[in-house]
Amino acid sequence: MTDVAREYAAALYMLAAENDAKDAYMEALDTVAAAFQSEPAYVELLSSPAISKAERLQAIQNAFRDAIPDEVVSFVMLFCERGHIRLFDACVDAYRDLHREAERLSVAKVTSAVPLDEEEQRRLVEKLETISERRVVLDCAVDPALLGGVIVEIDGKQYDGSLRHRLREIKDVMNE
C-alpha cells in the first residue's frame, strides 16, 4: 500500500469522523470500488491524459452523484484530479483498515473442510472475540482438502486445527 493511498484514506476518515459518517463513507467507497472492478476500462478512462481533466471529473460526478455522499464524490474527483485514480483500491483498503482499527473489529478468515453451521460460527466468533478482545466477523471458505477441522487467520496469526495439519505433524514425528 502506498503512502499516498494511506494519506488520502486518513484524510477522508477524519472527515467521515467529523460528519459521523464512517460507515456511510465505507459503503460509498465500496460502491465506487465495485464499479471500477466491474468496468476496468472506467479506470483507464479516468487516468487517460487524452481526455480532458474536466471531462474525467464530470464523468465521476455523473456516475456517482446520486449514489453516494457528496463528500465521497468530491474525494474521488480529487483523487482523479491529482492523478492517483489507479491507487483507488489501495486507498479503499487503507480506509477499511482505519475503520476496522477504530471500531476494534477484526476479520477472521476461516477455512473448514465442510461449511460451518450457524451455531458453530457463533461459538467460533465468541471464542475469537475472547482471544482477540475485539469484535470479530467471519469470512468463511470451504476446502475439502483439509479433511476436517478449521484454519483461522486473524490479526496476522494463524491457528491451524485442521486434520490435514495434525496428520502432517504425526507423519513428521514418525519420520524423526
Image (cartoon, grey):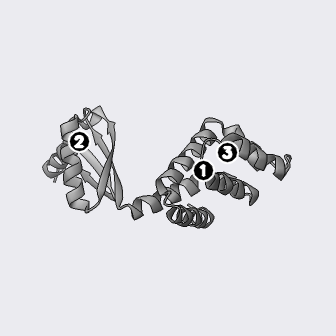
- Badge 2 or badge 3: first in the primary sequence: 3
Please tell me whether mark 1 or mark 2 is closer to you in this view: 1
Residue type at tag 2: Gln
Label drawn at residue 65:
3
Q: Is residue 84 visible?
A: no
Q: Is residue 132 visible?
A: yes
Say whether residue 82 is left or right of residue 23. right
Q: Is residue 78 above or below residue 148?
A: below
Q: Residue at x 51, y 47 (%)?
A: 27
Q: Which residue has dot 1 on it?
A: 69
Label drawn at residue 37:
none
Residue type at tag 3: Arg
Q: Which residue has dot 2 on it?
A: 121
Position in image of residue 66 (x %, y %): 64, 41
Instruction: Measure the C-alpha gap from mark 3 to mark 1.
Output: 7 Å
Q: Secondary structure at mark 3?
A: loop
Residue closer to the observer: 68 or 121: 68
Say whether residue 57 is left or right of residue 10. right
Residue closer to the observer: 166 or 4: 4
Q: Residues within 10 Å of mark 2 (few under 14, many from 20)?
A: some
Q: Residue at x 22, y 36 (%)?
A: 118
Name the residue at the front extreme: 19
Residue 122, quarter of picture: top left
Position in image of residue 111 (x %, y %): 30, 41
